[in-house]
Image: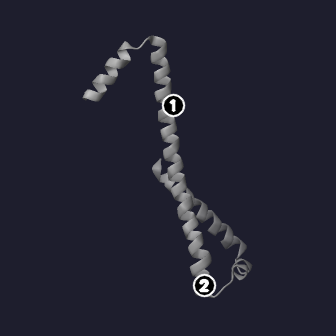
Amino acid sequence: MTVYERTVAKIMQQLPKPLLQEVSDFMTSLGVMNHCRKTLDIAESGLLALGLVLLMEFTVVLWLQGLTLKEYFAHRDPVAAAVYVGSLAVFAMMPLLVAR
């Protein structure tokens, strides 16, 4: 047991029961909030990656193909477009899936 853990244990022993429960509930809520924040950070990384992929798709790729955005969507096969959007959704959610 570290010095920190011993100190916390000693302080917790000296607290009255009702206050001990309040402190315990507060610490639990901090742990939950920390977990939620980590999940949000992971989700943000997936959305950032999706944004960068779409930025490259709609700028560099269209420029290399010599297409406008209107032409790009006009020539897109509906089935291929649905599969593409689905794969982008999986790409954006992948950090959350890997983190679990």
Question: Tag on residue 63?
Answer: 2
Circle 1 sits on which residue? 29
Q: Give the SS element for disc 2.
A: helix
35 or 82: which is nearer to us? 35
| Pointer 1 or 2: first along the chain | 1
For label 2, the crowd category at 10 Å Cα-Cα, with few meaning under 14, some 14 to 19 and many 20 or more, is few
Q: What x and y, as percent, mark residue 51?
A: 58, 65
Q: Amino acid at mark 1?
A: Ser
Q: Marks 1 and 2, Cα distance to the nearest angstrom? A: 50 Å
Q: What x and y, as percent, mark residue 11?
A: 35, 19
What colour-coding does the image apply?
one colour
Residue at coordinates 37% horizontally, 18% vertically from top-left? 12
Q: Work out which quarter of the rendered image holds the N terminus and state it.
A: top left
Residue 94 makes an appearance in the image: no
Q: Amino acid at mark 2?
A: Trp
* Extreme residue in the bottom direction: 66
